[in-house]
Image (tube, coloured by chain):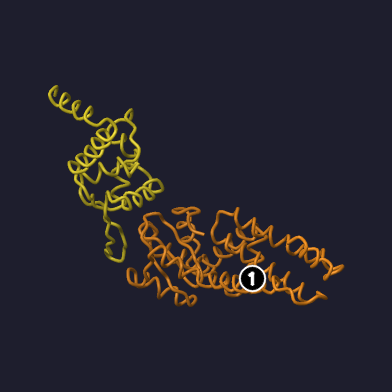
Amino acid sequence: MVKLDQINISNDGLTKFFSPIEAAILRALWSEGEMTTSELTGKTNIPLTSVAGTLDRLVKAGYTTRRTENINGRVRYVYEPVLSEEEAASEITTKILDSLVQAFGPLAVENFSKYSDKK
Amino acid sequence: MFGEITCYGQCLRSWAPIVALIVIMSIASITASLMLKNPKKRLLMFGFAQAGGLFAIATTFYLMDCTEMLSLYLYFAYVAISTFLIFGTLRYYDRLMIRRLEAKPAGSILKWTQEYVDMLISARVYYFDSAVPKAFAAGRSIFISIGLLEILDDDELKAVLAHEAWHIRNNSRIPFLSRLAMMAFSSTSEPELEDKADNFAAEIAGSAALSSARNKIDKVFI
């Protein structure tokens, strides 16, 4: 889910935090920067019918912004990621650590230091 | 409360069952309007229920032998005010949609769309921010999403605009109450309306443009 209210630990990669389509769109935007809708459907290989609603949701949730451009009488959206991959990773990590501390208090913090010692 | 109902029954004499029937129909329409998902149909059904209530009150007034029933006057005032509100909402449904979708005049982003519709009927064209290709008509306005502008070429967009323009023209031709009754009672008339709108669109913008637009956004625009 876009709002990070649901985390599926057993899923792979970004789909732990996002739906497969959301993850594909974000990965494409992180690698390309600015993209139009048709570039996005081409790059992700997902049909417009599935991508369109997801793009609306990503914009509403604040993960991407878009602007409209009028090029030679053709109106199109240009999408841009709001956060870079690093910024998104740090935001997600902070949110998860916060929720762990909220649930387990000092125990969680103790485990963080054990974890970083091991690494 | 119950005493008052039997009192109405006595005042109305043999007409009581008919008034009761109208009241039951009106209540049934309100129930139906609560169950309908489509907001426009819901509103129409509610409007129909209000009209039924109004009719029941008028019949009661006309047929009744007794006078001085304050609760009846109060209810009459309620029905009159709420009917006015409902009809007002229907008339200004497009203004509500403009605010809800934060729609802007389409002429500002694609000048020819407004000029094209001006040739067909007097209606405003608005665009709204969504990647999902969608077009619909409400009141005297046509709404198109940016997603629709993205995937259609000019000829296909003309076919869609002509289709929606036909709906507006058709709506203004049918008297309000029969439109209300038609939308409330028959579900079969809608595909028929869509066919007629398509015929008009094919005539104006060409059937090739219409069918390629249909292929691109099958069943997305109504």
At numbered mark 1, what does the secondary structure look like: helix, strand or loop?
Answer: helix
Horizontal and vertical percent position of residue A59: 31, 52
Horizontal and vertical percent position of residue A95: 25, 39
Q: Residue at x 49, y 65 (%)?
A: B206
Q: Which residue is mark 1?
A: B79
Q: Nearer the viewer, residue A107 or A53?
A: A107
Horizontal and vertical percent position of residue B202: 52, 65
Q: Residue at x 27, y 51 (%)?
A: A64
User: For chain B, what colour was chosen?
Assistant: orange
Q: Residue at x 38, y 63 (%)?
A: B128
Q: Is residue B3 left or right of residue A103?
A: right
Count neighbours of disc 1 (C-alpha within 10 A) and say few if under 14, some if 14 to 19, many if 20 or more.
Answer: some
Q: Is residue A102 left or right of residue B11?
A: left
Q: In which quadrant of the rendered image does the N terminus of chain B lie?
A: bottom right
Q: Residue at x 33, y 44 (%)?
A: A2
Q: Which chain does the yellow colour mark? A: A
- Chain for mark 1? B
